[in-house]
Amino acid sequence: MSKRYSHVPPGGGADYDWSADHTYVKVSAADTGGQYTLMEDNLKAHFALGLHMHRYHAETFYILEGEVDFFVDGDWLTAGPGTCLHVPPGIEHACTLANGCTAGRMLMIYQPSGFDGYLSELAQMTEADFEDQAKMDALNHKYDIVNIGPVPERDGS
């Protein structure tokens, strides 16, 4: 008989080690029937997630370690351990490690699920695929990612 629950130990789950972060899928789309995806994201020193939005899904970020600067709907805020930030569909957002912070760790919930599929497809791509703008546009469209630009400049306020 198969288990009716999932158990993922520390360091477990689908594992994507990128240049700017190391992500583990803890609860996948398959685990939730497509309702949500839960991931642990370990941010590296040069982490930056450019300005983007999602038309149909929400993201929730829960900071475990370090400090992360978020640009959300035109506002800058710094989130430290214990901070929870929920970004509904249609809201532009970006994030980077806070000034002087060299690493961070956060949980991310994507609702409905699907971001785990995006990471899986990215992991199978070649450098030529990444340089193919039409291929990247199609992938982003498939996973409801609307790229807007780089992380905005912070005005010091």
Image (spheres, rainbow, N blue to C red):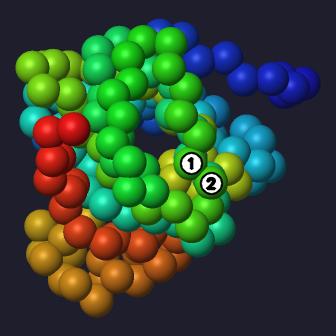
Q: Which of 148 and 41 is in front in this view?
A: 148
- Which disc is residue 57 wearing? none
Which image quarter holds the C terminus?
top left
Residue 73 locus on image (x, y percent): 45, 56
Q: State the residue at coordinates (52%, 61%).
A: 91
Residue positioned most to the front: 157
77 is higher (above) or lower (below) than 125: above
Q: State the residue at coordinates (19%, 61%).
A: 150
The answer to whether the residue labelled 1 contacts the one labelled 2, judged by CB atoms less than 8 Å apart, is yes
Q: State the residue at coordinates (38%, 17%).
A: 80
Q: Which amino acid does label 1 sit on?
A: Val
Q: Residue 92, can we see it? A: yes
Question: 10 Å neighbourhood of mark 2: few (<14), some, or many (≥20)?
Answer: some
Describe the element under mark 2 as helix, strand or loop. loop
Residue 28 locus on image (x, y percent): 62, 41
114 is higher (above) or lower (below) than 86: below
Residue 14 locus on image (x, y percent): 46, 35
- Which disc is residue 87 wearing? 1
Q: Mark 2 points at which residue?
A: 88
Q: Nearer the viewer, residue 78 or 38?
A: 78
Question: 10 Å neighbourhood of mark 1: few (<14), some, or many (≥20)?
Answer: some
Q: Residue 13, can we see it? A: no
Q: State the residue at coordinates (44%, 62%).
A: 92
Q: Nearer the viewer, residue 140 or 73?
A: 73
Residue 51 locus on image (x, y percent): 31, 60
